[in-house]
């Protein structure tokens, strides 16, 4: 199993909140101690993830985040083995420009770039970018976008006339080898795009039985196109030496989530047209009680989704319990796990040093002593 960490390109802190650069959270009435997403901190975080034994890091994309390509170029120069799962919105740039940027970044990092193709689940975020397509049209554009990318990476002349992009390449350029494609989406149109183009199908952290069902479905979809998929999940981690300590930390986070903040966040998330986000919201149902009330499976906690978009579940428990649950997810069909903690820097060391060694078959990178120097 491969383990990756998270590089919060919108800032970091000790509380489960989304923050803007002023230090005030996007949710009403909630504040946090914030670490800016400046290059020095992100380099420090990348080195920590590498030293802690993670294979790579995921860089999220969004209107309030730092650019993922530029950030990767910066952090990669200060790391040695770390891979970069670079998220970006398909269709906001032309496919050929994306291939050119990716090829340049692959050469600069000596092949450590992977692409996380996103389509966008927030109409408000998309409109901020100048994109007014509806949900299904965005995924159809993504399908056309990835079709052109595949043609460009083949390095052969071609003419493409699709519903969203037209290309006529007479003299192919060297954009390097096709990087692994990570892709997420829970709607029917999204799952079809994933089956046709993805190498790794990503999901939010639903309970293992639900993940197993989704893995089985996506295997069948990919097989219908003569393809195979690998599978990954994005989750947070709240782990301590004992279960009691882990629950106390979760309770600390829960205490910062005022009813007003939860309501504001849920209104914003309800306005999204992401099917995956709706599934996450269904896990907690807006409940705001005790820590135990938000457990949706042993050691799987839905409390984060009360005040955070995207992945809203956490592995919660002692180091041994979290490792055991990771193995249950592996048995459900996962081979990739992308994790995050609060704050990301300290928790990268905690999870890498105290949890991952307990997981059977963990793929941990042997990092040379000078890598974090």
Image (tube, helix red, strand yellow):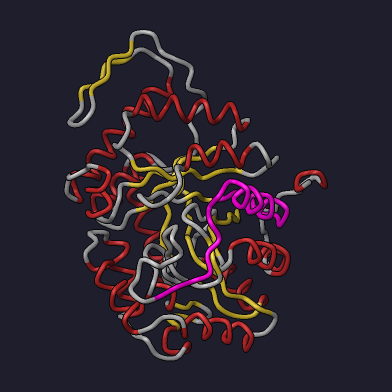
Q: Where is residue 173 in the image (x, y as percent from the top left)?
A: 44, 15
Q: Position of residue 343 (x, y in %)?
A: 58, 66
Magenta-tinted stretch? 30-57
Q: Compared to 367, does 143 lie above or below? A: above
Please indicate, yes or no, whether residue 116 appears anywhere in the rendered image. Answer: yes
Residue 360 versus residue 296: which sits nearer the camera? 296
Q: Position of residue 46 (x, y in %)?
A: 63, 50
Q: Is residue 48 magenta?
A: yes
Q: Classify residue 79 by image quadrant.
A: top right
> As drawn, which residue projects farthest toward the front?
22
Q: Is residue 234 left or right of residue 140?
A: right
Q: Which residue is drawn at 66% across and 75% down?
A: 319
Numbered label tally:
0
Q: Which residue is drawn at 45% across and 51% down?
A: 60
Q: Position of residue 308 (x, y in %)?
A: 39, 68
Q: In which quarter of the image is the N terminus?
A: bottom right
Q: Classify residue 143 by image quadrant.
A: top left
Q: Which residue is drawn at 65% across and 36% down?
A: 77
């Amino acid at each position: 199993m491969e383990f990756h960490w998270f590089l919060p390109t919108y800032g970091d802190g000790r509380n489960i909140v989304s923050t803007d650069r002023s230090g005030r959270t996007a949710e009403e009435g909630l504040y946090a101690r914030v670490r800016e997403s400046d290059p020095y901190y992100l380099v420090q975080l990348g080195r920590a993830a590498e030293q802690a034994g993670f294979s790579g890091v995921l860089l999220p994309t969004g209107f309030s985040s730092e650019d993922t390509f530029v950030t990767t170029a910066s952090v990669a120069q200060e790391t040695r083995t770390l891979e970069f799962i670079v998220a970006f919105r398909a269709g906001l740039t032309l496919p050929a420009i994306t291939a050119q940027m990716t090829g340049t970044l692959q050469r600069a990092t000596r092949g450590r770039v992977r692409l996380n193709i996103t389509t966008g689940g927030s109409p408000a975020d998309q409109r901020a970018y100048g994109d007014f397509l509806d949900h299904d049209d965005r995924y159809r554009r993504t399908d056309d976008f990835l079709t052109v990318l595949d043609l460009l990476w083949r390095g052969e002349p071609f003419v493409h006339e699709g519903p969203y992009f037209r290309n006529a390449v007479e003299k192919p350029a060297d954009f390097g080898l096709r990087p692994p494609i990570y892709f997420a989406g829970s709607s029917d149109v999204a799952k079809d795009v994933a089956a046709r183009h993805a190498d790794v199908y990503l999901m939010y952290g639903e309970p293992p039985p639900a993940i197993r069902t989704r893995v089985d479905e996506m295997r069948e979809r990919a097989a219908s196109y003569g393809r195979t998929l690998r599978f990954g999940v994005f989750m947070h981690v709240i782990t301590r030496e004992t279960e009691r300590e882990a629950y106390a930390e979760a309770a600390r986070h829960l205490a910062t989530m005022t009813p007003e903040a939860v309501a504001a966040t849920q209104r914003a998330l309800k306005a999204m047209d992401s099917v995956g986000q709706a599934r996450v919201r269904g896990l907690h149902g807006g409940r705001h009680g005790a820590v135990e009330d938000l457990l949706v499976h042993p050691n799987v906690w839905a409390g984060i989704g009360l005040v955070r978009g995207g992945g809203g579940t956490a592995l919660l428990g002692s180091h041994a319990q979290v490792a055991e649950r990771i193995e249950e997810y592996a048995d459900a069909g996962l081979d990739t796990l992308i994790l995050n903690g609060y704050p990301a820097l300290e928790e990268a060391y905690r999870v890498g040093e105290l949890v991952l060694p307990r997981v059977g078959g963990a793929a941990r990178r042997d990092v040379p002593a000078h890598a974090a120097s």
